Image (cartoon, grey):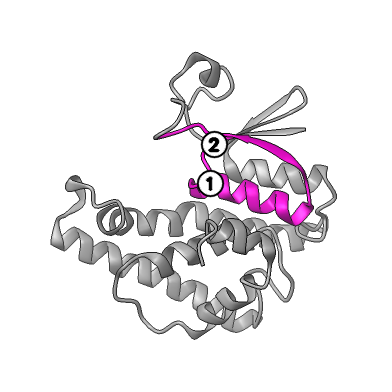
Amino acid sequence: MLRILGKASSINVRKVLWTCAELQLPFAREDWGSGFRSTAEEAFLALNPNAMVPVIQDGDFVLWESNSIIRYLVSQYGGQQMYPAEPKARARVDQWMDWQATDLNGAWSYAFVSLVRKAPTHQDPEALAAGCRNWARNMTILERQLERTGAYVSGADFSLADIPIGLSVNRWLQTPLERPALPAVEAYYDRLNEREGYRLHGRNGLP
C-alpha cells in the first residue's frame, strides 16, 4: 500500500491526499512535521534530505516534492484524464501547476504568515499591505483565466492543475483579508465543492 508521510493539515500533503481520492487509491498516512514526528529524524532524512513533507513510498520507490508526487500518481495509477499524454494539453496543465508553485505560492507568503499564523516576524504594516496587493494581483490572473475557460483552470475539464490551484483558492478564501470581487473564482470554488476529494482535503475537512 502507498505510504504517505506528512501531517494532513499541510497544504502540500493535501495535494497528495486529494489526488489519491480522485484516483480512489488506498494509502496509509503517517503524521510527520510540526507538532508531530520531527522531519529532522534520521529515518526521515534518509527519505528526503530536505526534511520537508510530503514524502511517499510506493513499494521500494521513494519520492518527494508534492507536484512531482501527484504527477507520478496520476501517471502510475490511471489518472490520464487528469494529466493528458498529448504534449500541448499536458503542457497547459504543467504551466498552471508551475505558476501556482512559483508566482501564486510566493504571493501569499507574507500575508498568510501574518494574518493566519500571526508570526511576530511578519507584522510590518507596509509589508503586509504589499503582500495582500500581490496576492490579489495573482488571484486576478486566475480570475481572467477562469473567465476564459468557463470551467477549470486549464480548460473545460478538471485536471491535475486544479488540485494545487484549488488548494490555493481555499487558502485565499479562508484568510481574513479584504478581497476584490472575483466571481469566476467563486464559481470555480463552487464547482470544486462538488468533488468529494476537495470537500475532504481541499478544505481540510472543514464545512
Disc 2 residue type (three-letter):
Gly
- Left-right relation of 119 to 56: left
Residue 57 in the image, given as x and y percentages of width and height: 69, 29
Q: Is residue 24 magenta?
A: yes
Q: Which residue is mark 2?
A: 6
Residue 193 occupies quadrant: bottom right
Seen at 62% across and 70% down, the residue is: 192
Q: Which quadrant is the N terminus positioned in?
A: top right
Q: Secondary structure at mark 2?
A: loop
Seen at 51% across and 80% down, the residue is: 186
Q: Nearer the viewer, residue 115 or 65?
A: 115
Residue 13 occupies quadrant: top right
- Left-right relation of 81 to 176: right
Residue at the extreme front: 207
Q: Secondary structure at mark 1?
A: helix
- When the figure is inspected, residue 190 is found, relative to residue 48, above or below; the finding is below
Residue 120 in the image, given as x and y percentages of width and height: 17, 47
Q: Which mark, residue 12?
A: 1
Residue at the extreme top: 42
- When the figure is inspected, residue 58 is found, relative to residue 167, above or below; the finding is above
Magenta stretch in the rendered image: 5-34
